[in-house]
Image (spheres, rainbow, N blue to C red):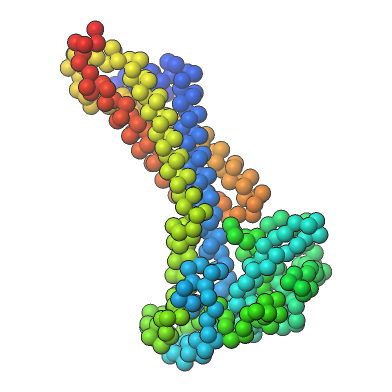
Amino acid sequence: MTALLTRLLGRLPIGWLQLVHNKGRLAAALSGVAFANVLIFMQLGFLGALIESIRLPYTILNADILVSASDANTLFDGSPLPRNRLYQALAVEGVASATSLYYGRIDWKQPDGTIRVMDVFGVDPQGAAFDEPALARASETLMLPDVALIDRKTRNAPPGLFEAIEAGEPYRFETKGRELTVTGTFAVGGGFSADGYLIVSDQTFLRLFPARLPGAPNYVLVRLAPEAASAAVIADLRARLPASDSAVWTIGEAATRDQRFQTTQKPVGVVFGFGVVIGVLVGVIIVYQVLSTDVADHIREYATFKAMGYPQRFFLGIVFEEAFVLALFGFVPGVLLALGLYAVVAAGTGLPIFMPATRPVFVFLGTLAMCAVSGAVATRRLARANPAELF
């Protein structure tokens, strides 16, 4: 390593030699940088899982445009829409079809007494509301009363449940005073507010939620004709539907707005974002402490170089060299440990937590910047030092 750095730097790697001279301090410094990296990776992982779990239910909707209540910030919290908005949407040129979507939430009490929170979609079985072949094939089954499809990625379900359902063995459970019969599965995955999803017909939904009115769905799913221009249809819909109770978005825009709201306005998103900041601060403090101590330990040697005429950038180069070594060798164990923790969390919670290819790159660049800032701060004492006063 010394020879390689010598060739790269064109000089003796003083920073590297100073770090390896005290192996205990080096190990402690690398552990601190790795810990900061793990903290940042985990917070980014949780934030990424939140963003992905918000996006997933939108991906199964067979629609180009989503009409929601004007006060809807997320998929769950909007007011019902007047059903008349569906017929008004159908009258717009370029709209091929439209169907209503009801959205609710139930508790699924399992045999062991534990409760799983399930988000429920209520749809017209003939409306082709979902873009998944398994759901299209199950449309006739959903016409039967009190029949449901269940998300096979639901967290902490009884072992073997989904395999048995897919093999043709119905599963029955009671909720809201009714018995639902689960006859099929689909795949979405739970998020931070619910453990999974159920799909039922609109009639079954209204029996589960008797306070809901048939003429007041939560959303209208609009599909465009092949030759229709999305922007023109959206503009026409916004002109025709009253802004006082309706909002019109593409599916992608609706998902992005939902993600933005939950990551910036909801406590869970703010906490994860703040956790990233804390991780950076922890790393800066640890690296600064190491580099500052190293500068203090070698202040007389640096003063000698300074008296010989070496400029401040020479000392910055040495400290930045140390910062780069700490960033590089602390990052590697940090990313490996984070990958292991991602797998453990994903298996234990069912959250869509994973490592995108770009995340290690950005975290490493951030680690370099973090260490560089610490190094620049650590050399301020040397910049102010007078060699004559140090001897």
Would you place residue 380 above or below residue 271 in this image? above
Residue 184 sits above or below residue 299 on the image: below
Q: Nearer the viewer, residue 355 or 193?
A: 193
**Number of marks drawn:** 0
Q: Quadrant of the C terminus?
A: top left
Residue 64 higher or lower than 85, as above or below? above
Q: Where is residue 202 drawn, in percent x and y? A: 65, 81
Task: Name the residue rendered at 49%, 77% in the picture.
Answer: 68
Foreground pick, 68 / 228: 68
Q: Name the residue rendered at 44%, 90% in the picture.
A: 92
Q: Looking at the image, which residue sits at the far left?
A: 309
**Residue depicted at 49% across the width and 24% down the height:** 28
Q: Where in the figure is residue 49, as x and y percent of width and height?
A: 54, 54
Which residue is located at x 49 percent, y 49 percent? 272
Q: Most extreme residue toward the top, as rendered?
A: 391
- Seen from the viewer's position, the closer of residues 325 and 297 is 297
Residue farthest to the bottom, as pictured: 91
Q: Position of residue 214 (x, y in %)?
A: 62, 85
Quadrant in which residue 389 is drawn = top left
Q: Is residue 362 left or right of residue 138?
A: left
Splitting the image into 4 quarters, where does residue 22 fall?
top left
Q: Could you tell me if residue 28 is visible in this image?
A: yes
Q: Say if residue 359 shows up in the picture.
A: no
Quadrant including the N terminus? top left
Q: Residue 118 vs residue 181: left or right?
A: left
